[in-house]
Image (cartoon, rainbow, N blue to C red):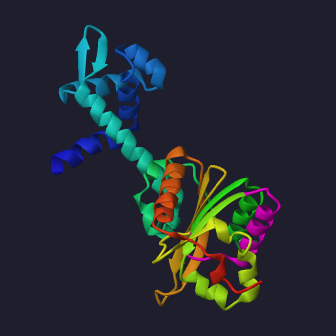
Amino acid sequence: MEDALEEIGFLANSANRVRVLDALGGAPASRRELQEETGVPRSTAARVLDDAEARGWVDSEGSRYRLRPAGAARISEFRTYVATTEGMQHLGETIDWLPEPARSLDFRHLRDATITTPTEANPTAQFDRGMELVRDAEEYRGLTRNSLPQYMTELRDRVVQGELDFQGVVERGFVDVLRGDPERAALWHDVADRMWLYDGHVPVNMHVVDGTALVWLCDEDSDGEEVIVKGLLESDHPEVVSWAESLYEEYRGESEPMDPGILPPE
């Protein structure tokens, strides 16, 4: 392990080493060419190349150097690690609020994610952002434990007006909430035929809206019980959207269509 850490440190401790070896990955080059491409001083580039050659990562022929497969593999893996770390840094403390299914995502793909959290000026910023996206949507797929009335009102109205291609999966247990609240249940009658009920716990509140994945960032209260919504993550990275769509289809495949008859009469 110590030898592996020493190799990692060889790259991690010098941005110039990474720049020079990364530039060398394209095609063989001279020290002068590498210096001009990277802006690294020639003397520094020379040291990098000599050290890398001693490690067996670089070959030289005359005045030209080329990256060997051993060096190329290390640089590639190091770039991956750097990108992963950048994704984690971008998430900051919100990484602790990712729902369990989202923790399988490659953090590299979250480097450009938009994260909305409450502010002193706007304590409901995350909900406002979610509503903004839903209000403008043409296609919606949702996987949720429940649904806020204000969101359901907007979704129902747009479905009724023929403006929204809507589908959703919700926990079957949420139906009990609707049975006890006829006014809230009334919002569901017009979309019941587009809903599926999942027996069991849905471990994430997530939407796919017009090719953008929306994931609610949540935390538990001090008693470890009530879920507190801390923010909203949105990403249009193809890998993140593909993950969200696949997760939705997985749960829908294990769910049953909602029978409108289980709702209180309008």
- Count the marks: 0
Asked whether 169 or 205 is in front, the reply is 169
> Picture coordinates of residue 197 (x, y %)?
54, 73
The picture quadrant where one finds residue 258 is bottom right
Using the rendered image of the protein, determine whether residue 41 is visible from the camera's viewpoint. yes
The picture quadrant where one finds residue 159 is bottom right
> Picture coordinates of residue 55 (x, y %)?
19, 30
> What residue appears at the point 23 percent right and 18 percent down from the top-left corner?
59
Specify whether residue 97 is painted magenta. Answer: no
Is 72 left, or right, of 240 in this rendering?
left
> Picture coordinates of residue 150 (x, y %)?
75, 75
> Picture coordinates of residue 106 (x, y %)?
43, 51
Asked whether 164 or 118 is in front, the reply is 164
Farthest residue to the right: give it: 161
Is 257 left, or right, of 139 in this rendering?
left
> What residue appears at the point 40 percent right and 58 percent down from the top-left corner?
104
The picture quadrant where one finds residue 122 is bottom right
For the record, the magenta segment spans 144-164
Vertical order, 168 against 234 (above or below): below
> What residue appears at the point 47 percent right and 62 percent down from the top-left corner?
253
Vertical order, 14 against 107 (above or below): above
Vertical order, 256 against 89 (above or below): below
Is 111 left, or right, of 119 in this rendering?
left
> What residue appears at the point 31 percent right and 11 percent down from the top-left corner?
64
